[in-house]
Image (cartoon, helix red, strand yellow):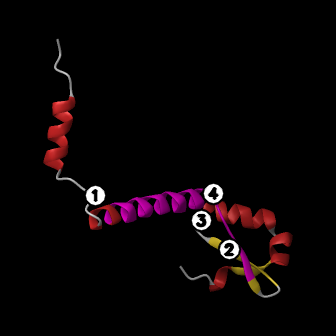
């Protein structure tokens, strides 16, 4: 994603807020807002934000899984299934 075309000063945001909100709602893009020439904020549509958050959660889950594998905190699936079956009470 190339952000260079999506960088605008805060005065642009103030003058075009409704247009910006509409555009960001329709597209998966972000707008970088600057103040005094420095990037200060990023604005994006809510759907894009939610997708980004979901992606981050999945990446965190993968990282946690990899960490658990590396530290040996895993068991073979057959052992887990056997334990689950053994823990169930037989129907009367």
Residue 60's tag is none
Q: Callout 1: helix, strand or loop?
A: loop
Disc 3 to disc 1, how far (Cα)? 42 Å
Relative to 69, does residue 15 appear above or below in the rendering?
A: below
**Tag 3 near tag 1, CB within 8 Å:** no
Which residue is painted at 38% across and 61% down in the image?
Answer: 64
Crowd around label 1: few <14 · some 14–19 · many ≥20 (10 Å): few
Identify the residue under disc 2: 31
Q: Residue at x 56, y 83 (%)?
A: 2
Tag 2, which secondary structure?
strand
Is residue 36 rendered to the left or right of residue 39? right
Q: Nearer the viewer, mark 2 or mark 3?
A: 2
Which SS does the magenta portion mostly show? Answer: helix
Q: What stretch is highlighted in magenta?
A: 39-66
Residue drawn at 74 percent across, 67 percent down: 20
Numbered label attached to residue 46: 4
Tag 4–tag 1 contact (CB < 8 Å): no
Looking at the image, which is closer to me, 12 or 81?
Answer: 81
N-terminal-most mark, 4 or 3: 3
């Amino acid at each position: 994603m190339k952000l260079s075309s999506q960088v605008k000063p805060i005065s642009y945001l103030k003058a075009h807020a409704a247009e910006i909100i509409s555009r960001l709602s329709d597209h998966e893009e972000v707008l970088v807002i600057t103040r005094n020439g420095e990037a200060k904020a990023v604005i994006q549509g809510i759907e894009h934000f939610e997708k980004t958050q979901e992606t981050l959660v999945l990446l965190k889950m993968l990282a946690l899984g990899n960490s658990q594998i590396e530290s040996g905190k895993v068991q073979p699936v057959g052992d887990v299934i056997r334990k689950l079956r053994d823990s169930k009470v037989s129907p009367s």
